[in-house]
C-alpha cells in the first residue's frame, strides 16, 4: 500500500509538471495568434509622434522583431530555469511584479475560501434543520447566488457598507474590513457550489439506514448531525474545495477591479489590456501550479481520510471521473 | 446603484449645508482655480484617486502619460513654466536668448537648484537631459520624448550656469517645448542607469517640491514634501517648501468608486469623473475643475484621399451637420466650450473661425444634394448605388469619446449618412486606426507651441499628412513651410491665422468641441490648486483647510 | 459515494432520494414562461417596444422609470427598456454560441477519448488537464484578449473555457455506457464501431450533457456579462445586457441604468438554473 501510494504520488507529480509547462506554452500560442503588443501601442500613441525607424529600434530591443517560434523558445528556456522574463508594459522583472501582488490575492482568496465554507455549511444545515418556511427557503439560496453577476454583488456591497454605512474606506483596499467584503463578493458563488453538494449529501446520508437506526434510538437531530452525518457529508467538500481554488483566482480579476485592490487579478486585467505576454504567461502558469498542487494534495490526502475510497479509485477520481 | 434614497438624500443635504457654510466661494466654473478662503496653512495629507498609474516608470517613456504626468509634475521641475494661456516664464532657466534665425539658444540657469540627492542642477545635468529627450537610447528601450524638436543638433555646457543649444534649422518652438510635460529634469545619475533600474520609480531623482516616499506598481505612489525646496516658478505666488505634507496617488479603476469616495469624504480628489455628474457635485458644494490643455481641439482630421471625402461638399456637409451645442448639452456641461478653430482657443496664435463650420442642417443637406447624394426611402443617401457611409473610431485616449461619437452618429444619420461605430481598446486601436488608414481620424493631441502644426499638414519632411493631401495643395505647402521656418513670432501669427482659415474652408478638419482631457472633482477643503498648460493639477501651492 | 462537480453537473443523489416528479412544479412553469418571453424578445423585439434603441432624444436624458419609459432613459436619452429588449438577441445568441462551442468541441474530445481509449485517451486527457488547470474566467480573459474585444469573441472565449468540463463529462458517460452489457454485446456480435457509437453510446451520454448545457447557458450569460464589465464587449450602440450594466454603472445618479438590465439578467439565469435542476431530478 505504501509503495503504491508513493509511486502514484510520483506519477501524479510528473503529470502536474507537464500540465504547468503546457499551460505556459498554451498561453504563448493563444496570445501570439494576433499581432499587437504594448510596446508598439505606446510608441504609436499620437502624443509621441515617433518615426518608423525610431519605433523599429525600440521593438528590436524587446526582441519583438524575432519570429514567433524563436520568441517561444527563448521564453520557454528562460522559464525552465525559473526566469519569468521582463514585462513589456512596465519594464520590470515579472517575478518582482508577481511577488508584490501575490500577498494581497492570497489574503483575498484565503478569506473568501473561509467565508464560502462557513456560508455553505450555514446554508446547508439551515436547509436541513430550520423549520418551515426558512429551511426550504434556504435551499433556493445557492441557485440565487449562482444567478447574480459577481460584479453586481461587489458594487452593491461597496455602495451599502462603505458609502452609506461607512464601515470601511473603499480606497483602503487592504484593510481587514475591506478585505472581508471583497472576500464575501468572491466567496458567494463559491459557497453556492459547496452548499449544493453539502445539501445533496446531507439529504442522502440522512436517508441511510444507520441514520434511521440512530433516530429510532432517540438521538436528537443536532446530535445525529454532529456524530454521524457531518463527516461523510463533508468529505466530498474537500474535492469541491480543491476544484474551486481555480475559480477564486479567476474571480479575483473582477473582484479586485471592483474593490480597487492590487493583486494578481488586477495585474491580469492590466496585462490583458496591453497584451503583456510575459506577465500573462507567468500568471497562467502560477494559476496552473496552484490548481495542480491543491488538487494533487486533495487527491493524495483523500484516501487517507476516507477508508471507503481505495487507491484504485483515487487516480480515476483525480483525472477522469468528474 | 443606490439602495436607500432617504439616507443618501440626508447625507447630501448634510454635506451641502456643511460645504455651503464653510466655503461660500467654492466651485467656480471652468478651469478656474479654487478661490481660497482663510489663510493658507501648512500640513495635512492629500489623497488623489486616479484611474491608473500608467505603465512603465522610465522617465522618458512615461512623462507624457496622462496619469504618471501627475507624479512627475511634483517630483521634477522644468526649465520653463507654461501656464494655461501658453505664456512662458522662467523656472530653472532664469533667462534665455536666441540668435536671429532661431537656430541657437542660450539658457541661463538659476543658481542653487539641487536634485533630492544633493547634486546640483547645473549645465552638465541639463545637457544630459536635453540629449536624452532628443535622442533617447532606443537600443536600450529608452525612447526619445515625443514632439521634442527633430531639428535638435547639440547642446553644450558653456559654464556651470550656461547651456548653449543648437538646431539644424529655425526652431521657434524650442523654449515653449521646455515647459511641455515631457521635458522633466532628472538627475544624470538616474539617467545613466539601465532601463530596468529606471523602471523602479524609487530610483528616480528629481529636483521638484516632493520626493517619492514609497510606491507600489499599479496601486499607489506616496510623495513627501521636500523641506529645502526653494526654486518654484517665478510666477508662483507661493515660494519655498510645499504646504501639504504628503500626496498619495491611489489607483481606483472604477469611476463611480472614485467619485463616491470623494463624496463620502474618504478621499480629496477624484480624477476623471463623468462630466454629467459634475453639476450635481457642484450643487453639493464640491469643487470641479475642467482645465483645457494647449493643443488641438477634439475633432476629425478628414482623409481627403478616400471617397466620399474627396469631395469638398461632403466634407463641408460634415462640418455643418454637427450640432456642437447638442454635444455640449448632452455629453458635457456648460463648462465645455465649442471649438472655434482646429486649435484650442487658449493656444497663442489661435483665432476664431467658428463661422466657417457653424451648425446648419439645411445647408448640410443642400451640400449633399448638390454633390449628388440622393435620399432613399429609408432616409439614407446613396449615389450610383453606393451608400453614403462612414465609420467612426472613438479615440480611447479621451474618456467621453464614445458618447460623443454615439451622438454624432445620430446627427449624421439625420442628414442621410449611414454611420457605424467601431471602438477598440488602446492596443488594438493603435494597430488598426491610423491617420490615413481611416476616413475620419478623431484627434486629441496637446502641443505646447502652435509652430508644431506645420509637421502634420503635408507629407514633406516626414510630415504626418493628416488630411491625405500630400503636397497637392500649394497653399497648404506654402503655409506649412512658412510656419516651420519662421523666426519672427509676429509674422508667424499672421501665417497661422491664414492657415486656420484655409484648413477650415477646405474642410480638412471638422472640429467638435474644445478638449478637456483631464477633469477633477475635489473636496471643498482643498484650496489654491494650480493647473499648467497641459492641464495637470499641481498641489505645490495648495493647502488643506477644515 | 457521490461527488458533485464545480458546475454541479454530476450525479447528484437520485432514485430514492427524491420522489420522481410527475407534475411540473409551479416554479418550473414560471421559469419556462420567462424563457419564452426572453426568446420572444430576441426573435421579435419590435413587437414589445416601439421606441428606437439606437437614436435617442438628447433632451430626455436620464429620465427615471415611468409609464412612458419603463426602465427610464440613458445618457443620450434613449429608452432603456427598448435597449434591453433589442439587446436580448445578442445576449442570448452569444450565450448559445458559448454553449455550442463547449458542447461540440468538448463533447467530441470526450467522445473520442472515451470511445477509442489508449494513447488517444492519454493525450486528450493531458490537453483537457491543461484547460482545466487554467481557471476558466482567467482562460476566457486571455482568449478574448487574443481574439479582440467583441461580444462574439467573448462568447467564443467563454465557450473555450467550458470545453474541458464538457469533455470530462462526455468521456465518463461514454466509458459508463461502453462498459454496459448491451454495448459490449453489440460489439461482440460484430456491430460496426460507428454504428454502436451512434446508436448506443451517444444517445445515452447526451442526457447528462444536455443538463450541463442548460446550466452552462445561464453561466455563459454571467461570464459574458463579466467580460463586458471589464470592457471586453461590442462597441455602442450594441445593447447586450452585460454592456448595459457595465456602462450604466458609470452614471451613479441614474441607478436604474444598472438595476433594470441586471434584474433581467438575474431573472433569466435563475429561470435557466431552475430548469436545469428540474431536468436533473426528472430523468
Image (spheres, grey):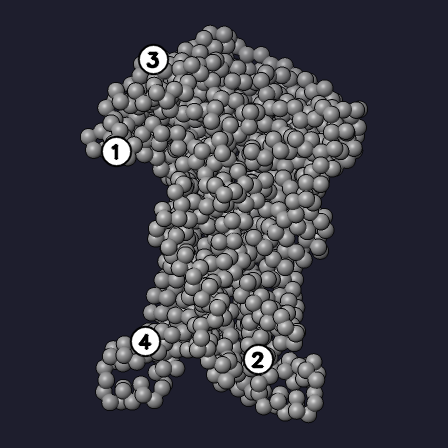
List the residue tagged with mark 4. Answer: C202
Q: Residue at x 34, y 66 (%)?
A: C104
Tell me the SS state at disc 4.
helix
> Residue B115 bears which disc, if any?
none
> Residue A203 bears which disc, if any?
2
Instruction: Tell me the chain of label 4.
Output: C
Do tag 1 and tag 3 residues touch (Cβ < 8 Å)? no
Residue A124: x and y in percent read: 61, 73
Residue B325: x and y in percent read: 48, 24
List the residue tagged with mark 3. Answer: B475
* Distance of label 2 from label 4 (alpha carbons): 31 Å
Vertical position of residue A184 compared to residue B543: above or below: below
Tell me the SS state at disc 2.
helix
Vertical position of residue A277 compared to residue A200: above or below: above
* Other residues around mark 2 within 10 Å, as few (<14) / some (14–19) / many (≥20): some
Q: Nearer the viewer, residue C29 or B361?
A: C29
Q: Residue at x 33, y 69 (%)?
A: C108
Q: Nearer the viewer, residue A83 or C166?
A: C166
Instruction: Tell me the chain of label 2.
Output: A
Instruction: Tell me the chain of label 1.
Output: B
> Residue B377 bears which disc, if any?
1
Judge depth for marks 1 and 4 and give the one in front: 1
Vertical position of residue C177 compared to residue A152: above or below: below
Does label 2 lie on the same chain as label 3?
Answer: no
Is residue C181 visible in the rendered image? The answer is yes
Classify residue B449 as left or right of residue B228: left
Is residue B116 visible in the rendered image? The answer is no
* Distance of label 3 from label 2 (alpha carbons): 87 Å
Amino acid at each position: 500500500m505504501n509503495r503504491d501510494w508513493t509511486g502514484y504520488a510520483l506519477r501524479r507529480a510528473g503529470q502536474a509538471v507537464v500540465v504547468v509547462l503546457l499551460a505556459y506554452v498554451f498561453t504563448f500560442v493563444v496570445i501570439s495568434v494576433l499581432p499587437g503588443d504594448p510596446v508598439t501601442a505606446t510608441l504609436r500613441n499620437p502624443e509621441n509622434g515617433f518615426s518608423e525607424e525610431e519605433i523599429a529600434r525600440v521593438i528590436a530591443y524587446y526582441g519583438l522583431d524575432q519570429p514567433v517560434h524563436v520568441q517561444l523558445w527563448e521564453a520557454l528556456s528562460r522559464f525552465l530555469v525559473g526566469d519569468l522574463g521582463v514585462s513589456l508594459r512596465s519594464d520590470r522583472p515579472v517575478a518582482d511584479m508577481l511577488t508584490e501582488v501575490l500577498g494581497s490575492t492570497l489574503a483575498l482568496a484565503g478569506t473568501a475560501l473561509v467565508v464560502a465554507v462557513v456560508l455553505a455549511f450555514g446554508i446547508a444545515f439551515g436547509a436541513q434543520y430550520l423549520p418551515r418556511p426558512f429551511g426550504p427557503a434556504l435551499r433556493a439560496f445557492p441557485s440565487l447566488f449562482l444567478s447574480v453577476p459577481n460584479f453586481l454583488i461587489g458594487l452593491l456591497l461597496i455602495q451599502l457598507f462603505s458609502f452609506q454605512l461607512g464601515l470601511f474606506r473603499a480606497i483602503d483596499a487592504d484593510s481587514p474590513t475591506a478585505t472581508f467584503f471583497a472576500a464575501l463578493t468572491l466567496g458567494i458563488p463559491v459557497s453556492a457550489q459547496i452548499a449544493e453538494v453539502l445539501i445533496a449529501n446531507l439529504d442522502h446520508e440522512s436517508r441511510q439506514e444507520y441514520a434511521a437506526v440512530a433516530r429510532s434510538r432517540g438521538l436528537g437531530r443536532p446530535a445525529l448531525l454532529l456524530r454521524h452525518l457531518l463527516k461523510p457529508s463533508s468529505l466530498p467538500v474537500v474535492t469541491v474545495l480543491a476544484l474551486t481554488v481555480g475559480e477564486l483566482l479567476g474571480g479575483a480579476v473582477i473582484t479586485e477591479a471592483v474593490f480597487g485592490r492590487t493583486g494578481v487579478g488586477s495585474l491580469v486585467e492590466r496585462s490583458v489590456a496591453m497584451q503583456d505576454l510575459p506577465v500573462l504567461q507567468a500568471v497562467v502558469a502560477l494559476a496552473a501550479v496552484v490548481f495542480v498542487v491543491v488538487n494533487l494534495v486533495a487527491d493524495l490526502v483523500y484516501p487517507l481520510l476516507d477508508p471507503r475510497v481505495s487507491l484504485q479509485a483515487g487516480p480515476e477520481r483525480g483525472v477522469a471521473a468528474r | 446603484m443606490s439602495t436607500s434614497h432617504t439616507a443618501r438624500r440626508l447625507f447630501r443635504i448634510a454635506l451641502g449645508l456643511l460645504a455651503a457654510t464653510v466655503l461660500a466661494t467654492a466651485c467656480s466654473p471652468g478651469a478656474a482655480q479654487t478661490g481660497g478662503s482663510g489663510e493658507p496653512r501648512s500640513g495635512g495629507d492629500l489623497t488623489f484617486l486616479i484611474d491608473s498609474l500608467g505603465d512603465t516608470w522610465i522617465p522618458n517613456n512615461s512623462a507624457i502619460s496622462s496619469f504618471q504626468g501627475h507624479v512627475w509634475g511634483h517630483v521634477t521641475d522644468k526649465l520653463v513654466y507654461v501656464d494655461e494661456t501658453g505664456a512662458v516664464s522662467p523656472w530653472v532657466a532664469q533667462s534665455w536668448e536666441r540668435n536671429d534665425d532661431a537656430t541657437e539658444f542660450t539658457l541661463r540657469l538659476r543658481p542653487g537648484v539641487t536634485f533630492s540627492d544633493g547634486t546640483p542642477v547645473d549645465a552638465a545635468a541639463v545637457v544630459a537631459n536635453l540629449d536624452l529627450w532628443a535622442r533617447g537610447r532606443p537600443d536600450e528601450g529608452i525612447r526619445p520624448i515625443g514632439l521634442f524638436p527633430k531639428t535638435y543638433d547639440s547642446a553644450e555646457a558653456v559654464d556651470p550656469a550656461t547651456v548653449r543649444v543648437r538646431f539644424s534649422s529655425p526652431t521657434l518652438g524650442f523654449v515653449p517645448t521646455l515647459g511641455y510635460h515631457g521635458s522633466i529634469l532628472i538627475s544624470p545619475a538616474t539617467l545613466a542607469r539601465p532601463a530596468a533600474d529606471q523602471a523602479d520609480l524609487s530610483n528616480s531623482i528629481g529636483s521638484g517640491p516632493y520626493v517619492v516616499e514609497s510606491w507600489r506598481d499599479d496601486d499607489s505612489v506616496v510623495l513627501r514634501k521636500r523641506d529645502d525646496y526653494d526654486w518654484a516658478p517665478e510666477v508662483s505666488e507661493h515660494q519655498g517648501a510645499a504646504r501639504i505634507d504628503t500626496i498619495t496617488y491611489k489607483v481606483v479603476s472604477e469611476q463611480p468608486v472614485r467619485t463616491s469616495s470623494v463624496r463620502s469624504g474618504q478621499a480629496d480628489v477624484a480624477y476623471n469623473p463623468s462630466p454629467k455628474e459634475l453639476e450635481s457635485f457642484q450643487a453639493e458644494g464640491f469643487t470641479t475643475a475642467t482645465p483645457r490643455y494647449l493643443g488641438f481641439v477634439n475633432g476629425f482630421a478628414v482623409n481627403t484621399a478616400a471617397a466620399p471625402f474627396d469631395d469638398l461638399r461632403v466634407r463641408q456637409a460634415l462640418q455643418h451637420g454637427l450640432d456642437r451645442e447638442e454635444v455640449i448639452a448632452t455629453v458635457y456641461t456648460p463648462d465645455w466650450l465649442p471649438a472655434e478653430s482646429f486649435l484650442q482657443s487658449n493656444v497663442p496664435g489661435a483665432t476664431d473661425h467658428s463661422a466657417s463650420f457653424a451648425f446648419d442642417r439645411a445647408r448640410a443637406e443642400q451640400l449633399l444634394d448638390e454633390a449628388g447624394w440622393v435620399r432613399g426611402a429609408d432616409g439614407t443617401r446613396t449615389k450610383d448605388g453606393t451608400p453614403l457611409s462612414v465609420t467612426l473610431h472613438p479615440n480611447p485616449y479621451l474618456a467621453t469619446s464614445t458618447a460623443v461619437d454615439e451622438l454624432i452618429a445620430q446627427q449624421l444619420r439625420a442628414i442621410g449618412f449611414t454611420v457605424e461605430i467601431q471602438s477598440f481598446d488602446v492596443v488594438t486601436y493603435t494597430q488598426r486606426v491610423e491617420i490615413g488608414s481611416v476616413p475620419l481620424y478623431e484627434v486629441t493631441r496637446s502641443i505646447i507651441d502652435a509652430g508644431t502644426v506645420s509637421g502634420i499638414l503635408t507629407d514633406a519632411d516626414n510630415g504626418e499628412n493628416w488630411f491625405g493631401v500630400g503636397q497637392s495643395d500649394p497653399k497648404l505647402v506654402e503655409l506649412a513651410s512658412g510656419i516651420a521656418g519662421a523666426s519672427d513670432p509676429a509674422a508667424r501669427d499672421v501665417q497661422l491665422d491664414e492657415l486656420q482659415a484655409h484648413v477650415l474652408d477646405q474642410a480638412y478638419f471638422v472640429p467638435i468641441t474644445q478638449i478637456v482631457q483631464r477633469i477633477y472633482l475635489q473636496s471643498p477643503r482643498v484650496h489654491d490648486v494650480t493647473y499648467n498648460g497641459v492641464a495637470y493639477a499641481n498641489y505645490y501651492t495648495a493647502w488643506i483647510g477644515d | 459515494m457521490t461527488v458533485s462537480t464545480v458546475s454541479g453537473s454530476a450525479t447528484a443523489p437520485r432514485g430514492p432520494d427524491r420522489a420522481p416528479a410527475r407534475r411540473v412544479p409551479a416554479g418550473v412553469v414560471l421559469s419556462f414562461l420567462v424563457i419564452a418571453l426572453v426568446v420572444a424578445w430576441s426573435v421579435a423585439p419590435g413587437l414589445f417596444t416601439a421606441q428606437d434603441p439606437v437614436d435617442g432624444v438628447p433632451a430626455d436624458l436620464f429620465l427615471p422609470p415611468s409609464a412612458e419609459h419603463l426602465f427610464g432613459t440613458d445618457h443620450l436619452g434613449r429608452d432603456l427598456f427598448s435597449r434591453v429588449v433589442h439587446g436580448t438577441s445578442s445576449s442570448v445568441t452569444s450565450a448559445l454560441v458559448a454553449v455550442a462551442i463547449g458542447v461540440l468541441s468538448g463533447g467530441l474530445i470526450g467522445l473520442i477519448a472515451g470511445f477509442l481509449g489508449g494513447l488517444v485517451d492519454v493525450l486528450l486527457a493531458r490537453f483537457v488537464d491543461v484547460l482545466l488547470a487554467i481557471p476558466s474566467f482567467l482562460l476566457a480573459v486571455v482568449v478574448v484578449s487574443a481574439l479582440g474585444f467583441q461580444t462574439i469573441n467573448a462568447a467564443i472565449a467563454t465557450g473555450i473555457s467550458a470545453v474541458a468540463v464538457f469533455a470530462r463529462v462526455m468521456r465518463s458517460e461514454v466509458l459508463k455506457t461502453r462498459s454496459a452489457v448491451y454495448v459490449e454485446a453489440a460489439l461482440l456480435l460484430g456491430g460496426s464501431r460507428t454504428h454502436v457509437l451512434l446508436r448506443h453510446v451517444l444517445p445515452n451520454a447526451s442526457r447528462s450533457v444536455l443538463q450541463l448545457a442548460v446550466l452552462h447557458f445561464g453561466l455563459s450569460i454571467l461570464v459574458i456579462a463579466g467580460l463586458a464589465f471589464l470592457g471586453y464587449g461590442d462597441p455602442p450602440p450594441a445593447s447586450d445586457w452585460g454592456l448595459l450594466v457595465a456602462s450604466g454603472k458609470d452614471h451613479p445618479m441614474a441607478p436604474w441604468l444598472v438595476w433594470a438590465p441586471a434584474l433581467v439578467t438575474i431573472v433569466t439565469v435563475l429561470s435557466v438554473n431552475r430548469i436545469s435542476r428540474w431536468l436533473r431530478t426528472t430523468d
